[in-house]
Amino acid sequence: MNYFKAHQRILVFIVLSFYIFTTAAESTAVSGDLTAPAPELLCRSAVLYDLTTGKLLYEKNADEVTPPASMTKLMSLHLAYQAINAGKIGKYDLVPITAAASFKNSPPHSSLMFLEEGQKVTLLDIMIGLALPSGNDAGIALAQAITGDMASFVEAMNLECDRFGLTETSFVDSFGYSEFNQTTARDFARFCVIYLTEHPEALEELHSLTEYTYPREENIPPGKTSTHGPITQYNHNSLVGRYKGTDGLKTGFIDESGFNIALTTERDGRRLLAVLMGGPGKNSSDGNLSRAIDSTELMTWGFSAFTVVHPQLPALPDGRVWKGAEDYVKLSVAEPPVLTLPRWEAAGLKYEVELDTLLIAPVAAGTRAGSLICRNIFDEIIFKLKIQTEVELPEGSTFSRLRDSISMFFLRG
């Protein structure tokens, strides 16, 4: 189809332009300047999290309510995975395509999978059609397959919002066409964390695919033909396969929202998650490009300006115990938290061990014996850990107790 060939050429141009920009951005990323400022994004709202530690790295108007557009489809996919895991439906079960789910009856200007009534389609095919070409027709078919109709499916979507505490998120359809779907960058990022945690297989199975062809021969019933024949469509997330480590998640656009994206990228065991909403664009080519630029700048900054630190704590001395069977007891400290820090801060961490001076027997195992404090180069406390005794230490002999009582008197004096 000429329309799709033209669309693909435009997309290739966008992707190539974006790839050139990405290469340049990565080559000029923060090196010596470890305090590089956050990028000035074109979109109206955004958040960036390091999922290794849950650290919020960036926010811009994070609580501004915006229609999620086709990012809505992530909640629909969440419900599909729930139904699969509960044994209510299988990935390879055939989903009946009704007239309502046919692309011919989809809203105007819809993204489409190009389903047609009577075709034979597995649930997994529908899920890919929802994730990759972002088919609104697939959204209808999925809702019918999971709960039987749109109204009950939307109710289930909103019940999940309530369960997850997403107070600013609500839905009125399964595919994001309506301006009355709503969320915020912060709320939707929280949902994305849940989605990735509960359905990690979705990245490889759905979101990291670069293209999808439908319908195939097996989708068309004997004696029937499809309106358009096989159509190859590409992942609307142009960063997948082109920006190193990007493997999800979902884009979205309607006039009322602007250009949105929920984006996740993994490098060297470290995963960042960004949600950007309300990106500008006079047309789809312009909007897709501005979205790609914003996403690339934010991700590049997140990986370059921050690092994950596994603190290497100093060895602890033994703790002095007064009036005990032994004069000293072994001390320990809990595992330190894994941190995401600006690189300048990570380079200058220092540790202090502060022990209590009067630890008096009998001492139970786990008794507080002091604190281990981590500070940055400005002496700001990064974290503080309790130092405790490893073992129980009973009282000592009468002589040792008397001796230590005298020593403590002069120590206090």
Image (tube, rainbow, N blue to C red):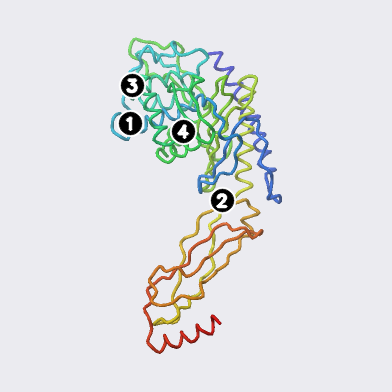
Q: CA distance from mark 3 to mark 4?
A: 33 Å
Type of residue at label 4? Thr
Give the SS element for disc 2: strand
Q: Does residue 15 appear left or right of residue 337 in this picture?
A: right
User: In the shown orientation, is residue 381 left or right of residue 191?
Assistant: right
Mark closer to the chain start, 2 or 3: 3
Residue 1 is marked as none
Q: Nearer the viewer, residue 192 or 179?
A: 179
Q: Secondary structure at mark 1?
A: helix
Residue 340 disc label: 2
> Element under label 4?
loop
- Asked whether the beta carbons under mark 1 and mark 4 sit within 8 Å of each other, the answer is no
Q: CA distance from mark 1 to mark 4?
A: 24 Å
Residue carrying label 3: 95
Q: Name the foreground residue: 177 vs 268.
A: 177
Three-letter code for the amino acid on which mark 1 is drawn: Ala
Q: Is residue 26 above or below residue 173?
A: below
Q: Badge 3 local density, few (<14 within 10 Å), some, or many (20+)? A: many
Percent across and percent down for residue 326 are 41, 82
Q: Earlier in the sequence, mark 1 or mark 3?
A: 1
Q: Residue at x 60, y 26 (%)?
A: 288
The answer to whether mark 1 and mark 3 are in CB contact below 8 A is no
Callout 3, which amino acid? Answer: Val
Q: Position of residue 298 (x, y in %)?
A: 62, 38
- What's the distance in space between the residues labelled 1 and 3, CA to CA? 14 Å
Please give the residue where the numbered disc 1 appears in the rendered image: 83
The residues tagged by marks 4 and 2 sit, at their Cα atoms, a distance apart of 27 Å
Q: From the viewer's perspective, is 85 left or right of 21?
A: left
Q: Quadrant of residue 344?
A: bottom right
Residue named by callout 4: 167
